[in-house]
Image (cartoon, coloured by chain):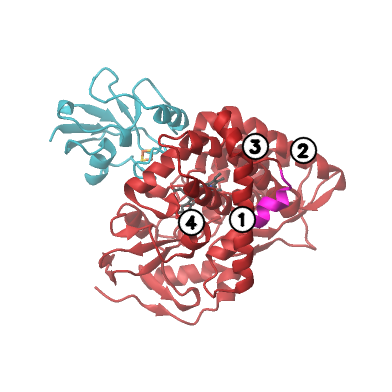
Amino acid sequence: MPKIIFINADGATREVVASTGQSVMEAALAAGVSGIVAECNGAAACATCHCYFDSNAGCTGEIGEHENEMLGFTASERTADSRLSCQVRVVAEMEGMTIRVPSVQ
Amino acid sequence: MSAVPVVADISYDALLDDPYPIFRRVRDTAPAVFVAAANLTLVTRFDDIMKIERDPATYSSDNPASLVNKVMGPTFMRKDGAEHAVGRKAIEPSFRPGTIKEHWAPKFAEICERLLNSVIKAGEADLFPALAAPMASLSLMEMIGFKEMPWETLALWSQSLIDGAGNYSRDAEIERKAMAAGAGIDAAIEAVLDHHREHPNPSILSSMVRADPPMPIEEIRANIKVIIGGGLNEPRDAILTLTLGLLANPAQKHSVLAKPELWPTAFEEAVRWISPIGMYPRRVTREADLSGVTLPEGLQIGLCVGAANRDDRRFADPDQFDIFRPRQSHLAFGAGAHFCAGTWVSRQTVGRIVVPMLFERLANLRLRDDAPPVLRGWVFRGPVSLPVRWDA
Ligand code: HEM
Ligand code: FES
C-alpha cells in the first residue's frame, strides 16, 4: 500500500494510499483526486487520465504501442514524463512518488 | 429509497420530434423514470450515468434477450469484462490515432473533395444526401475493408440493421430487411477475407483476421454488423449538426473560420448539443440504489446521454450551441469500457476534414428561410434534411 503524492497544476498536493495491483488512475479516482477525468475508465481510449510521472523512476512499466499513440492526443503537452495513468500499475516501489496532474485533460 | 416513478402521458411521436423538453422533465422528476412511450426506464442525469458506467458489475452491457444479439449475432459490444476486452483489442489497430492521421485522413479528405466537386456548381443542396450520408458511408466502407460498392448499399444495410435491432413489435417486413442486410454483409465479408489474410493492412477486417488469437468468423460477422449499424449514422449526423450549429450562430461561425484551431472545440460542442446517439441500454444485474431510487434486479435501463449532455446541473444554458462555454467533458461517446472506439476517427473526419472543407469550398454557405432543417429521433438524433445555398 504505497503512499503516492499527486500535485495539481495549481500546486495543490494530495497524498493517496494506493493498493498495489490497481491502476494509478483507479487509485486517484477512488481518492477523489481532481483533474483526472478518465472517460473510458481504463480502456486506453480517451486520453483523459494523462499524468506526468518521473520517467527515471523505473517502476512505471513499459509504454505499450497503443498507449504511445494515444499519448499523441493529450490535451496538455506530451513530455518524456507523460503516461496514461490507467495503464500504469501501482507497485510497492512507488512509495513516496510524486505524480503531476496536467491543467487540462 | 423509493421506487421508479412512471411517466405515461408522453407520446412516442413527441419523443421523436423533440426529446429535449421531455428529457428535462424526466431529469427533474427522478434519477430513473419509467417512460411508458419508450417502454423503458430512462436515466438522464450526467453524474448518475457516469456512476453507472464505472460499475459494470451492477450495470451490464450483456443482455441475452436483446434484439441486437438476435439480428447481428454474438458481439463484444454487448459483453462485459474479458470477453469484451478481447474483441475490442482485436479492432484497436485500425482505430489508433497514428493510423488515423497517416492512413485514413488523406483517404477521407479525397472522398470529401470528390463529393464537394460533384455538387459545387449547383449552388444549393440538401447536405444529408449530397454530402453527409455518402461521406459517412464511403469512409466506413474503406475502414472496414470492403470492395467498393454504391454508398447507398452500405447505408441501406446500416438502416435495416438499426431498424431490426429496434423492432420490438416484431414487424415482419422490418425483420425481412434486417435479415437481407445481414446476408448481404456476410457475402461482402466473404468476398474480401482471403485478400485481407494475405495482404495485412490497416482495415478493420485485416485487424480482425490478424488478431491474436484471430477472431472466429461468426464473431467477425457479428462485429462488422455492429460497426455498420453503429459507425455510419453518427458521423453523418455529427457532420450535419456541426454545420447547422455554425450556420445558425453566425458569430460563432466567424470565430471558427477566423481561428481554425477552434474546430475541435466546435466539434465537441456539436455532439454535446445534439448527441448522435441519444440513448444506449444497460441491464441491472442485482438490486441497486441509484441516487435514492431502487432499481430491481433484471431491469432494463436506457442511459440517455443526449439528456445528460443537457443536464443543467453540469452545463449552464444547456440548450444553447455555444463553442465558448467552459471546457468540460461530455458523454456523446459514452463512458467506461465501451467508450466509443470511433471517437478519434470521428473527431478527425468530422471536425478536421469534412466540415472545415465544406465551409472553405462553398462560399457564403447559408440556411434557407423557405426550407428549414428537419431534425428527428431520440435514440439516434440528427438533421434528416439540411437544405443550404452557397455562391456558385
Ligand atoms: C460522432 C460520431 C460517433 C458517436 C457520437 C459515437 C457514439 C458512440 C457511443 C455513445 C458508444 C457507446 C455505446 C454503448 O456503450 O452501448 C459507441 C460505441 C462504439 N462505437 Fe461509436 N460513435 C461515433 C462514431 C463511430 C465510428 C465512426 C465508428 C466506427 C468506424 C464507431 C464504432 C464504435 C464501436 C465499435 C463501439 C463499441 C465499443 C465497445 O463496445 O467497446 N463509432 N459509439
Ligand atoms: S481512462 Fe481513458 S485512456 Fe485512461
Please identify the quadrant where the N terminus of chain B is shown: bottom left
What is the x, y in percent for residue B135? 69, 45
Chain letter of the residue beneath label 3 in the structure image: B
Chain B shown in which color?
Answer: red
Same chain under badges 1 and 4? The reply is: yes
Residue labelled with disc 1: B183
Residue labelled with disc 2: B114
SS at badge 4: loop
Marks 2, 4: nearer the viewer: 4
User: Which span of residues is magenta-colored?
Assistant: B149-158
**Closest to the observer, B111 or B210:** B210
Q: Amino acid at mark 4?
A: Gly
Residue labelled with disc 4: B73
Q: Amino acid at mark 1?
A: Ala
Q: Which chain is cyan?
A: A
**Which callout, 3 or 2, points at the residue further toward the start of the chain?**
2
**Closest to the observer, B318 or A87:** A87
Crowding at dot 1, Cα within 10 Å, few <14 / some 14-19 / many 20+, comes out as some
Marks 1/2: CA–CA distance: 30 Å
* Total numbered badges shown on the rendered structure: 4
Q: Amino acid at mark 3?
A: Ile
Q: Quadrant of ligand 2?
A: top left
SS at badge 3: helix
The residue at 38%/57% (across/down) is B61
Same chain under badges 2 and 4? The reply is: yes
**Which callout, 1 or 4, points at the residue further toward the start of the chain?**
4
**Closest to the observer, B53 or A32:** B53
Same chain under badges 3 and 4? The reply is: yes
